[in-house]
Structure formats: structure tokens, C-alpha cells
Amino acid sequence: MSRALPKYNKRRVAIIGGAAAVALTGAIVAGTALAGETSKSATPTARTLADVGSITCPDVASQLPEIPATAQAEVDRNLTLLQTQIDEANKRLVDTVGQGGKNFVQNAILGPLEDKRIATVNRIATAIGRTADKPQGLDALAPCTLNAGGAAGTGEEAGAGAEAGAGAEAGATPSEAASEAAGGAEDTGNAQGAGDAGEAAGTGAISCPDVASQLPAIPATAQAEVDRNLALLDTQLAEANKRLVDTVGQGGQNFVQNAILGPLADKRKSTIDRIAISIGRTAEKPQGLDSLAACTLTQ
């Protein structure tokens, strides 16, 4: 049960807002409000946000509890990063007008943005939680919406209609599937069926480095959480292999990298980070696990 979160200190919001305004002069600037962070274009272009709509996101700063002094700098950096992520998404919205199918905005812009925001708000919660009560429920603030002139496309499997072109950015720090498959510490275990289907269809299969075998001794207090996240790695890989089969023939030459492998790497990085953090609470935190996040397509 998430507790109601106190309002964020107004002085800190002002500091953060000022820093973001300086950093983002001349770009698509998003002003924060609880209902959303709407963008305003500082420079008119042939394709303005009035044509394509704009992205709004729930405000995170106002939903934070009192921030310990030891966490203030890290929290401020991540709040500024949330702003930057929105500005980049709004710029991509303008730059990619007319690209992809009906679900392009959802799959290539809104989905990756949500994933980035999840990773960022989790870092904020973790920073606060080191010396105070860790805020709960911040993940609910991650999803954003497309207002006005655009339609995001809803109700269909994420990634099914994503057609990110050669210039589309693949960076997404992904949202996690709610389901957690039981057992299977090997990254490739639960994905075997989807991988076989991909090979049979001539699309190849995605393979990822094994994480379980690279972990140190796991403290008993962290075992359950580590197991859940190892199972989630399997689920992520299986879903990526299924998407590989389902989207055969879609997108351009960089479709697989931008719409499947890139988001998968980001999801794995977030999951691997949680594994390292859970171990590090009562033992030495393992280092270098991020190098296991990237996966490859084998033919």
C-alpha cells in the first residue's frame, strides 16, 4: 500500500526549474505540473508541436517526501534528467512526423520515454531510501501521454507497430513486465520456444549473456529478489524473441536494433541494476554487470 507522499520542497523545485530552463534554452521546453509537463517550442519550425501535439508527463518533484541532504544532489540530477527526457521525446515527435505506422508514437517515443522515466524515478527513490524511508509508488508517474494533434495508439502490443528509422534513438530505460516467470536462472532458458520459432521463420533469434553465472554469493536476504529479477530477464528475452517473429518485414534496416535490441538492452540494464542493488544492501555490490545487458541477433 503506497503512502501519501508529502509535497516536495518548493525551494528545491525552483532551483531545479531554473537549472533546467538554462540548460534547455532554445529547445522544446516542458513546464512541470501535476497534470503533466507540457512542451513549448522556443523556435518555430516547419513542423511545429501544434501540428503533431505534445507530450505531457506527471510531475515527480511535487510527489517526493523530504529529501535527505546526502541524497539531494543525486535527486536533483535525476529530476533534471526527467525534464531532458521529455524535451528529447518532444523533439523526436517533431522530427519523425510521418514516419512509421499508426503505433509509431507509442512504440518508438512514448514507450521508450516511459521506460527511461521508470529507471530515473527508481534511482530517485533508491537515493532517498539510503538514509530515509524509500518512497513507494513513484512508478505510477512514469507513463506520459500525447496531447492535441497526435494519436499515440493504444491497446496493442508494445513494439508491434514500431517502425523507427535509421535516425531513431534506441535509448530507453525500460518499463518492466508485471509477470515474473518461476524458476530458470539462465537468461536463455525461458526464451527457447520463441527463439526456435524465430529461427524457423528465418528471422534468427536473440541471445543474451548469462547473468546468473556471473553473480557472487547471494545473501539470503537478497535471494528472493534476485530470483525474481533473473526470471524477469528470461521473460524479457522471450518477449523480444516473440516480437522478432511478429514484426518480420516491418520498419527499415535498423528496425531490429532500434525497436527490439535497444529497448531489450535497456530493460536488462534496469533489471541487472536491481540485482546488484539488492545484493549490495548486505554484501559487496557486484560491479560491471552492465556489460551483460546488450544482446545480439543470431541468424
Image (cartoon, grey):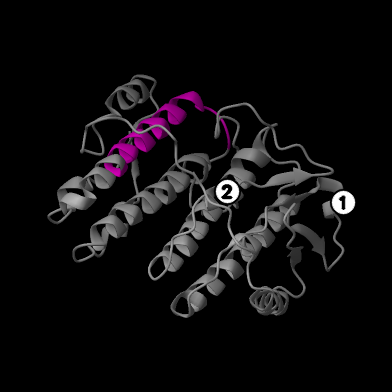
On the image, which quarter does residue 193 sit in?
top left
Q: Position of residue 95 (x, y in %)?
A: 72, 53
Instruction: Tell me the crowding category of disc 2: few under 14, some 14 to 19, or many 20 or more residues within 10 angstroms, Cα based.
Output: many
**Residue 114: which disc?**
2
Q: CA distance from mark 1 to mark 2?
A: 22 Å
Q: Position of residue 94 (x, y in %)?
A: 76, 53
Observer-nearest residue: 132 or 251?
132
Callout 2 amino acid: Glu
Callout 1 amino acid: Ala
Q: Earlier in the sequence, mark 1 or mark 2?
A: 1
Taking the magenta stretch, the answer to whether it contains residue 113 is no
Observer-nearest residue: 113 or 278?
278
**Could you tell me if the residues under marks 1 and 2 are in contact, i.e. CB atoms within 8 Å?**
no
Q: Is residue 3 above or below residue 277?
A: above
**Residue 264: which disc?**
none
Residue at x 87% of width, y 51% of height: 50
Q: Position of residue 8 (x, y in %)?
A: 63, 68
Quarter of the image that includes the C terminus: top left
Q: Which residues make up the magenta segment?
A: 229-251
Q: Is residue 108 above or below residue 87?
A: above
Residue linked to disc 1:
50
